[in-house]
Amino acid sequence: MFEDISKVLLITDMDGTFLPSSKIPSPKSVAAIRRFQQQGGKFSIATGRAIQAANQYFDSFSVNCPIIMCNGGMVYDLNGKRQIYDVFVPDSTRDIVKQLLKDNPDVGCEVLTLDNVYVPQMTPMEAQHNVICKVDPVICAVDDIPDNWYKVLFAIEPEKMDRLMGYVEAKGWSGVDFVRSSKEYYEILPLNISKGTALEKMRDICGMEDYTFVAMGDYNNDIEMLRAADFAICPSNAVDDVKEVCDLVLDFSCEEDAVAHAVEYIYSRLNRE
């Protein structure tokens, strides 16, 4: 599985896995990634973020493989600046969002398209998310958002999340998937689309069938990617559902250079095999 470093792809979630709470990649992890790439390994990211929110990081580290965006809605060639695969939520999502926001005025919301992040309902939690992602959103009504939505994100205080999830479950909306991506965020994704389906598309489209895919993640929206990978790793801060599907649970958190330790583990396997 790890015989040839040039046939190994390490792909990691960003927030809570690669990025610590400061949202600044650690020098140790960045150096480990650079060394891994210099020796022939492939490195990429898989994130729920839009292009605008991920671009801020590519001055501090580089990827040498397409990246997964919007929790699986897009596979993007950063060097060619083009999407090589994408899928959108159905048009009916617009009505779902309007109803949810009308019934839940304390829920923040953003819609991700290729060119912009649109916010039809601003709240303190949503504003905080914009600051974290360093995006300048377009504030507008739901009906004014252009078509081709990759995903919808709802932001709410963690203590209110169970209420929001219960509301959605009672509505029984079909044609889309709802997934919790952190303690504060709940998302609408295209039906049966995840970081895992995007990983499989990436493997096929990029001709990487003979690569060993090593995936890292920490939260529920990472589970399908971890299952689709050849080897799954999570930091010690991962939720229990993630730990259950991983081949390796590190003793180190995202605050303790988890990605650097994952790279060292890959090297240890290379030396044994």
Image (tube, grey):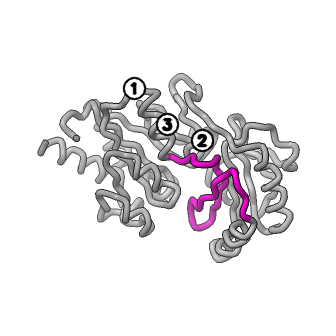
Residue 112 placed where, x, y %? 69, 44
Q: Which residue is mark 1?
A: 207
Camera-side residue of 20 and 222? 222
Under mark 3, the amino acid is: Ile
- Give the CA distance from mark 3 to mark 1: 15 Å
The answer to whether 241 is drawn above or below residue 269 in the figure is: below
Tell which circle, 3 or 1, labels the residue nearer the N-terminal end: 3
| Residue 190 among magenta residues | yes
273 vs 39, left or right, is left
210 vs 94, left or right, is left
Under mark 1, the amino acid is: Gly
Q: Secondary structure at mark 3?
A: strand
Camera-side residue of 34 and 121? 121
Q: Residue at x 35, y 34 (%)?
A: 42
Under mark 2, the amino acid is: Gly
Residue 61 placed where, x, y %? 44, 38
> In which quadrant of the rendered view does residue 244 lie?
bottom left
In contact (CB < 8 Å): disc 2 and disc 3: no
Tell which circle, 2 or 1, labels the residue nearer the N-terminal end: 2
Range shown magenta: 172-195
Mark sitting on residue 73: 2
Q: Which residue is mark 3?
A: 67
